[in-house]
Image (cartoon, rainbow, N blue to C red):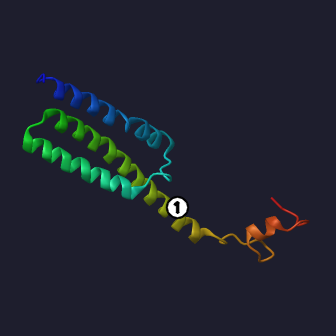
Amino acid sequence: MNEWLPTILATVAGILSTASFVPQVLKAWRERDTAAISKRMYLVTVTAFTLWSVYGFLIGAMPLIVFNLLSLGLSGTILFLKIRNERQKTGRQKTGSQNTGSQVTRTGKSAAVAEKEPGMAQSG
């Protein structure tokens, strides 16, 4: 067998595997929506790419090293965005629950209740 064939196959596989993460990174970055992304799956993926990279260093396989490090960077970015968005969502929920019912009208009812009652005059 030709000596270059395994390297060509590894390079093509690496390009395709790594490129598959790019649309997800772009979508998560632009839309800031990672609700449908599994944090556990990306924790496992990041761990796997780390181990594959170490293995590549140990056996001296350059395509394995390069493409697993690139994939690690992309999947790590997705995991980072997922964790960041979860923390921001949790922070908003905590501050939102503290403000609930804080505005009270002259009748002693919260503003949310007063807005729902028909016939209530609103003064400005």
Q: Looking at the image, is 58 positioned above or below residue 40?
A: above
Front residue of 34 and 5: 5
Mark 1 element type: helix
In this view, the residue farthest toward the bottom is 108
Q: What is the quadrant of residue 13 in the picture?
A: top left
Q: What is the quadrant of residue 100 in the picture?
A: bottom right
Q: What is the quadrant of residue 44 in the picture?
A: bottom left
Front residue of 5 and 17: 5
Question: Where is residue 90 shown, x and y percent of the image?
Answer: 48, 63
Question: Where is residue 74 shown, x and y percent of the image?
Answer: 32, 41
Q: Residue at x 23, y 40 (%)?
A: 68
- Please state, as top left, top right, bottom left or bottom right, where the N terminus lies in the image: top left
Question: Where is residue 122 shown, x and y percent of the image?
Answer: 84, 62
Q: Looking at the image, is 68 positioned above or below residue 83?
A: above
The residue identified by callout 1 is: 92
Report the amino acid beneath label 1.
Arg
Q: Looking at the image, is 68 positioned above or below residue 102?
A: above
Direction from residue 101 to residue 14 in the image, left or right: left
Q: Residue at x 37, y 39 (%)?
A: 21
- Please state, as top left, top right, bottom left or bottom right, where the C terminus lies in the image: bottom right
Task: Please tell me how crowded label 1 is: few (under 14), some (14-19), or many (20+) other residues with Cα within 10 Å.
Answer: few
Q: Residue at x 38, y 47 (%)?
A: 78
Q: Residue at x 47, y 39 (%)?
A: 27
Q: Looking at the image, is 12 positioned above or below residue 107?
A: above
